[in-house]
Amino acid sequence: MHQLMDALRHGSGRSAPSWQEQAMDIFFRDFSTEDKDLQLKIAEKALTDENKAMVFVKMPETLRKHWVKRLREVHNRIT
């Protein structure tokens, strides 16, 4: 029990952020100027999926921009 309390106090027991958490951090940092409805749609529908989030985190920045651009175009056609 004492070791567990020490681990919690010192943060040594903390695991790395999940793919989804990393993807959300990157997305909201890099695409904060996008339409708010589009941001919510991408965050809720795409980046909550572990596999899609992993791909988003691993892809180069230029590909991320292209991916968001494609989703923006679809979003704008629907709304």
Image (tube, rainbow, N blue to C red):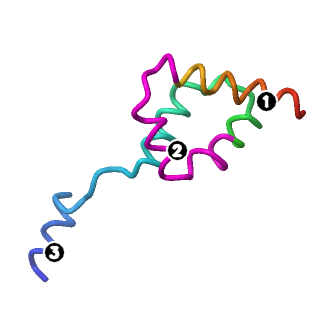
Q: Hey, what amino acid is under mark 2?
A: Lys
* Magenta span includes 26: no
Q: Are marks 2 and 3 in contact (CB under 8 Å)?
A: no
Q: Is residue 6 above or below residue 37?
A: below
Q: Could you tell me how far apart the alpha carbons at marks 3 and 1 are, in whole angstroms?
A: 49 Å
**Left or right side of 17 for 23:** right
Per the image, the residue denoted by label 2 is 52
* Segment tinted magenta in the rendering: 42-63
Per the image, the residue denoted by label 3 is 4
Q: Which residue is drawn at 42% across and 47% down?
A: 19
Residue 50, how many percent across, how many down? 48, 52
Foreground of the two, 43 or 68: 68
Picture quadrant where residue 4 is located? bottom left
Q: Could you tell me how far apart the alpha carbons at marks 1 and 2 are, in whole angstroms?
A: 18 Å
Residue 13, how many percent across, how many down? 20, 63
Q: Which residue is drawn at 57% across and 20% down?
A: 65
Q: Is mark 1 on a helix, strand or loop?
A: helix
Per the image, the residue denoted by label 1 is 74
Q: Hey, what amino acid is under mark 1?
A: Val
Pick the quarter of the image with the N terminus. bottom left
Q: Hey, what amino acid is under mark 3?
A: Leu
Pick the quarter of the image with the C terminus. top right
Q: Is mark 3 on a helix, strand or loop?
A: helix
Crowdedness near tag 1: few (<14), some (14–19) or many (≥20) residues, C-alpha within 10 Å = few
Foreground of the two, 17 or 47: 47
Q: Residue at x 62, y 44 (%)?
A: 43
Residue 35, how many percent across, how many down? 74, 28
Instruction: Characterize the magenta stretch by its predominant secondary structure.
Output: helix
Camera-nearest label, 3 or 1:
1
Q: Could you tell me how far apart the alpha carbons at marks 2 and 3 are, in whole angstroms?
A: 34 Å
Reading the chain from its start, which is encountered first: label 3 or label 1? 3
